[in-house]
Image: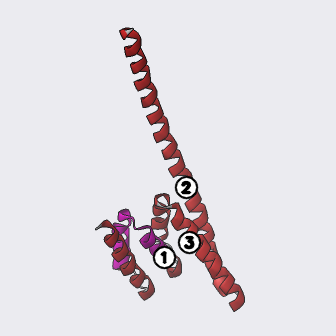
Amino acid sequence: MTVVLVLAGFIGVVALASYGAWAAQRRRREFARQAVLAKSLLRQFVASQSLRDWEDSCVNQAMDERKALSERVVSIGAPAVDPLIELLAHSDWAVRDDAVTMLGQLQSAGAIKPLLALQNGEESEAVQGSIRTALQRIRGASN
C-alpha cells in the first residue's frame, strides 16, 4: 500500500512538472504569436502615414484608423515593445512620435534606454515632447 502511494505521488509530481513545462512553452508561443501580430499591425500603422496626403475628410478617417491600430498594438502589451523600439529609428518623425507614445502607454521599463538614446539625437520638438511624456509615464509606473 505504501509503495502504491509513493508511486502515485511520484507520478503526480512528474505529471505536474510536465504540465509546468507545457504551460511555459505555451506562454512562449503565445508571446511570439502576439509579437508577430504587433509587427503586422505596426506595418499597417506605418503604411497609414502616407494617408496624410488625402483630402481632409479622408485624413479624419485615416486618423481614426491609426488610432484604432494604435489601441490594438497597445492592447497586445509586452510583445509589442520590441517592434515599437525598432520604429524609433524610422525616417518619418510622425512614426517615431507614435511609437514613443505607444511605448509610454505600455509603460515598459525596457523602453527607457532606447527612448533616452533617441532623445539625444532627435531633432523634432514633437518627438522630444512625446519622449519626455513617455519617460514620465514609464518611471511613474515603476514607482
Residue 90 lies left or right of residue 6; in this view the side is: right
Residue 119 magenta-drawn?
Answer: yes
Is 59 situated above or below 77?
Answer: below
Residue lying at 44% horizontally and 86% vertically, measured from the top left = 126
Q: Is residue 55 visible?
A: no
Badge 1 is on which residue? Answer: 96
Question: Label 1 amino acid?
Answer: Arg
Q: How many marks?
A: 3
Q: Position of residue 36 (x, y in %)?
A: 57, 56
Residue 36 magenta-drawn?
Answer: no
Badge 3 is on which residue? Answer: 70
| Helix, strand or loop at mark 3 | helix
Badge 2 is on which residue? Answer: 34
Question: Label 3 amino acid?
Answer: Ser
Residue lying at 43% horizontally and 17% vertically, measured from the top left = 8
Q: Position of residue 78 (x, y in %)?
A: 46, 59
Is 51 situated above or below 33?
Answer: below
Q: 31 and 89: which one is in front?
A: 31
Quadrant assignment, res 131: bottom left
Please tell me whether the stretch drawn in magenta is mainly helix, strand or loop.
Answer: helix
